[in-house]
Image (tube, rainbow, N blue to C red):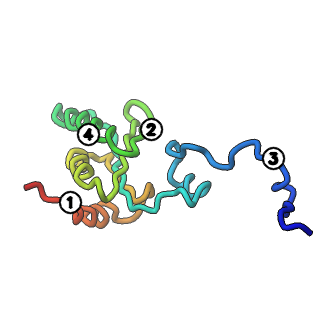
């Protein structure tokens, strides 16, 4: 039996569609790990997820919210979900972007809607444990 003979029926078929997508940036991190485990980033990332401040709070929080949106839009993995009062912004930062993460968190950290995700997932003590861990990588501005 020749060595170059296909082992199964699937290998005999011509490739009509590529087996991988060119860009996977639109995929949710969990879906990316399931579909393309080799392409999933193994880098430790933190995500800041936040929504608008409560409606009864002052103008200062609205200004902080607008500044936070402009910072989050510049992150490597910015997404939004929902509309109006249920709108949620998500910004992903790696270890090399701790300064930007700190800047964003200092603006929205006290909002009731603020959540911290580790590698795109909710984990216990993300705010109390993982954020301070990331602050070790923060460079002092001298």
Q: Nearer the viewer, mark 1 or mark 3?
A: 3
Q: Which residue is mark 3?
A: 14
- Is residue 66 found left or right of 24 in the rendered image? left
Q: Is residue 99 above or below residue 123?
A: above
Tags 1 and 3 in contact by the CB under 8 Å rule?
no
Q: Nearer the viewer, mark 3 or mark 4?
A: 3
Residue density around tag 3, few if under 14, some if 14–19, many if 20 or more, within 10 Å? few
Residue density around tag 4, few if under 14, some if 14–19, many if 20 or more, within 10 Å? many
Percent x, y for residue 37? 57, 60
Q: Which residue is mark 4?
A: 68
- Quarter of the picture holding the N terminus: bottom right
Between the C-alphas of marks 4 and 2, the distance is: 16 Å
Between the C-alphas of marks 1 and 4, the distance is: 19 Å
Secondary structure beneath label 4: helix
Q: Nearer the viewer, residue 17 or 120?
A: 17
Q: Residue at x 72, y 43 (%)?
A: 17
Marks 2 and 3, the one that precedes in the sequence: 3
Q: Which residue is mark 1?
A: 138
- Is residue 116 found left or right of 34 in the rendered image? left
Q: Which residue is mark 2?
A: 81
Between the C-alphas of marks 2 and 3, the distance is: 40 Å
Marks 1 and 2, the one that precedes in the sequence: 2
Percent x, y for residue 85? 37, 33
Marks 3 and 4, the one that precedes in the sequence: 3
Marks 1 and 3, the one that precedes in the sequence: 3
């Amino acid at each position: 039996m020749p060595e170059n003979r296909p082992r199964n029926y699937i290998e005999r078929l011509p490739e009509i569609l590529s087996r991988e997508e060119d860009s996977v940036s639109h995929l949710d991190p969990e879906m990316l790990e399931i579909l393309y485990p080799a392409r999933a980033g193994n880098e430790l990332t933190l995500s800041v997820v936040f929504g608008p401040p409560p409606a009864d709070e002052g103008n200062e929080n609205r200004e902080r919210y607008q500044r936070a949106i402009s910072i989050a839009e510049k992150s490597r993995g910015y997404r939004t979900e929902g509309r109006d009062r249920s709108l949620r912004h998500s910004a992903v930062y790696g270890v090399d972007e701790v300064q930007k993460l700190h800047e964003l968190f200092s603006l929205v950290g006290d909002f009731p809607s603020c959540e911290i995700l580790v590698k795109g997932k909710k984990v216990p003590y993300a705010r109390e444990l993982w954020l301070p861990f990331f602050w070790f990588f923060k460079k002092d501005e001298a």
